[in-house]
Image (cartoon, rainbow, N blue to C red):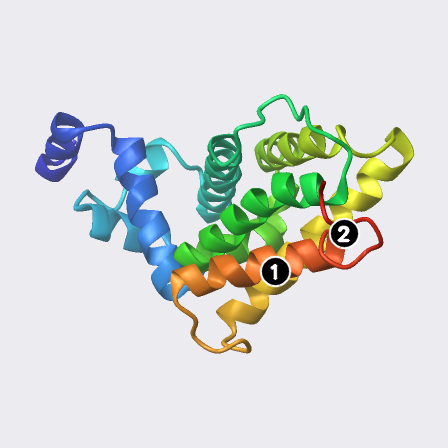
Amino acid sequence: MSTSDRQSYHHGDLRAALLRSALHLLDTDGADALSLRAVARHAGVSANAPYRHYQDKEALLAALATHGFTELKARFEAATDDPDGTAASHPADLAGTLAPLARTTVRYALDHPGLFHLMFGHPCVSHADVHAASDAAQATVTARIAAFAGPEHREPLKIGVWALVHGLSLLLLDGRLGDPMPEQVDALVDSVTRTMIGADWLPGATAP
């Protein structure tokens, strides 16, 4: 083991250090430019050190995507005061439950553009670990929706919210909606979510 490897182990977990470096490079340069050698160089370890934990680049990308979905799930859980999905079945209540999740997703996309593109548009998402982490994150959203919709409507509603949030994220990342400040992004996500769900304009949408 090289001196830099020993230092990395001494100062913390090598796997975590490699993952942090990979996340930085991913958001800076994108998945195509990412390599195990570049990650090792950024982490300050030998070129062979990443192979102790990642068989190849695809394994590293899968680990990054898994990390992303796991972190997103944790942020979903922290974004709502309704962890059991228990709420009234009013459009405004549904919007109030889903808007924080939508804001969380869009913020995550803007904070981690490279990782967001990887999580939702790279072949590594077919990896079993990525599938499991993605399903767990989606299950958090489904649990919130279950308080408002019957079983036959939960999946279409989840897909609709996913499409809405994903589209907003891409429009913002591509600069198609200008360069709003974070608080303006939150207001935009809230407004679009409430409008699409009908919390503001459907008959009886105003909560008593």
Residue 93 numbered mark, or none: none
Distance, label 1 to label 2, CA atoms, is 16 Å
Task: Please tell me whether mark 2 sits on a helix, a strand or a loop.
Answer: helix
- Three-letter code for the amino acid on which mark 1 is drawn: Ser
For this rendering, which residue is in front, 106 or 18? 106
Quarter of the figure that contains the N terminus:
top left
89 displayed left or right of 122? right
Q: Earlier in the sequence, mark 1 or mark 2?
A: 2
Residue 52, position as x, y percentages in the image: 33, 32
Task: Please tell me whether mark 1 sits on a helix, a strand or a loop.
Answer: helix
Residue 150, position as x, y percentages in the image: 87, 31
Quarter of the figure that contains the C terminus:
top right
Residue at 57 percent of width and 66 percent of height: 170
Residue 160 numbered mark, or none: 2
Residue at 66 percent of width and 42 percent of height: 126
Residue 91, position as x, y percentages in the image: 75, 44
Q: Which residue is mark 1?
A: 191
123 lies above or below 75:
below
190 displayed left or right of 53? right
96 displayed left or right of 48? right
Residue at 66 percent of width and 26 percent of height: 85
Q: Residues within 10 Å of mark 1 (few under 14, many from 20)?
A: some
- Three-letter code for the amino acid on which mark 2 is drawn: Gly
Contact (CB < 8 A) between labels 1 and 2? no
Residue at 30 percent of width and 41 percent of height: 18
169 displayed left or right of 24? right
Q: Is residue 80 visible?
A: yes
For this rendering, which residue is in front, 49 or 71? 71
Q: Residues within 10 Å of mark 2 (few under 14, many from 20)?
A: some
Q: Is residue 32 visible?
A: no
Outermost residue, right side: 152
